[in-house]
Amino acid sequence: YLNFFETKCKRSKELTDEAKKYIPGGVQHNLAFNYPFPIAIEKADGAYLWDADQNQYIDFLQAGGPTVLGSNYEPVREKVFDMLRSCGPVTGLFHEYELKLAKLINQYMPSIEMLRMLGSGTEGVMAAIRAARTFTKKKYVIKVGGAYHGWSDQMVFGLHVPGTGRLEATGIPRGANATTEEFFPNSLAKLKRRLVFNRLLGGTAAVIVEPVGPESGTRPVPYDFNQKVRELCDEFGALLIFDEVVTGFRLGLGGAQGYFNVKPDLTVFGKCITGGYPMAGGVGGRRDVIMTFAAGIGGVGEKAYVGGTLSANPLSCVAGYYALKEMERTNAPVIAGKAGDRLTKGLNAIIDKYGLPFVAFNQGSIVHLETSGVMLLDLRNPIKLAKELKPRKHMIEQMGAAYMANGLITLAGSRMYTSMADTDEVIDEALRRFELVLSE
Ligand code: PMP
């Protein structure tokens, strides 16, 4: 497959080589560091991407999840153009579409009594934690080990070595995450132990979970997991925060909270809230908690300050409103989910046919292809884990590159997001391409 990159991706190589002079690492996006070098995308439409050398790919990255309608979906794009012509990108003042979007989300997810829009999922998480601490007057925040909730000082740790508290990033002062704790994935007993302990030390303000399990469900949770976490939060007076940056509107318009039928106190949104348009994020939930932000806008009382010049700009709000309306009209989450089922079933058939020690599994339109045994790693032994991860990382990179050379874009060779644009024909063509790689 390296031959493909050498002979068919010349323009991408030129561009990304030059980019290394001006951009750290050559690309701006964490998901674009593919092996052996990044490709430069020129065109996106529905289920497909085209690179600068005119190679066509079936796109299962879908920007990391937000484009449930498929890439560059025309009816939403036209509404964005209309808004651009009438209002431009930003005024810094209120616009009707902020209200329309907040009302619509409240209709789909009744737990979102109020919504504060922000710029990204990272900001949404930061704001949720700030509101939770302000409201409960408690100190600790507990997350699932290995879960990603953005790159803020207090959250970006333990990604690779859950439970050890090892920092994932440098440049963070020790105290910044001293009140963030992790519990071993899926272990309600470990969560309870932390809640008990924290009660003596200033209390737990919030427990934050991605309801499908960390990393879009790479380590899936049992169906009743969220309900059990809800009960523990109630017992200890902690708020339950759902990170629905990926699942919100992808698993259904009611989000993962509808899917699992569990009501969080706060929900964090990201890229899905605008259907993939920029400045996408926010936090919504209980009126009494979200009102802690109101003091920052001339109110009185406790003040969980948040800001953002471009937050809730007219373009993002109009994109979000029409993306959700279109998802409702077209039933996109269900169609994308069926495509996910078809892809998963087909991948498992290929795995069986060649007797491979792999497995595919999905939750609707979120598909995991486990080829490197990451799920089998023993997270409790950090030294062994670090040793085992290295060769697996290389294998994951190689798988990703081999798929790409065969016209398939995945997230790190192991995760796929399907969209409404993935017709049966697209999925069947994708499976033919997957078989070319997996049979080797
Ligand atoms: N939480 C989850 C579950 C995510 O997947 C992401 C981004 N992939 C974030 C938070 C951070 O969102 P953003 O990139 O918009 O800051």
Image: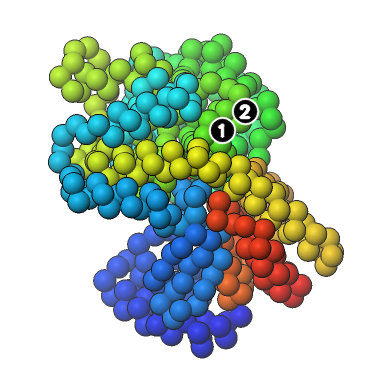
Instruction: Residue at 66% x, 47% y: name it.
Output: 338
Dot 1: few (<14), some (14–19), or many (≥20) neighbours within 10 Å?
Answer: many
Q: Is residue 47 visible?
A: yes
Tag 1 secondary structure: helix
For this rendering, which residue is in front, 440 or 162?
Answer: 440
* Mark 1 close to ligand 1, CB under 8 Å: no
Give the image location of residue 292, x and y in percent.
Answer: 29, 18
Residue bearing the label numbered 1:
256
What is the three-letter code of the residue carrying label 1?
A: Ala
Q: Are marks 1 and 2 in contact (CB under 8 Å)?
A: yes
Q: CA distance from mark 1 to mark 2?
A: 6 Å
Residue 42 spot, x, y in % from top left: 39, 71
Callout count: 2
Q: Which mark is residue 260?
A: 2
Q: Position of residue 401 (x, y in %)?
A: 57, 72
Which amino acid lies under the numbered mark 2 shown in the image of this protein? Phe
Label 2 secondary element: helix
Q: Quadrant of the N terminus?
A: bottom right
For disc 2, the neighbor class at 10 Å (few under 14, some 14 to 19, many from 20) is some
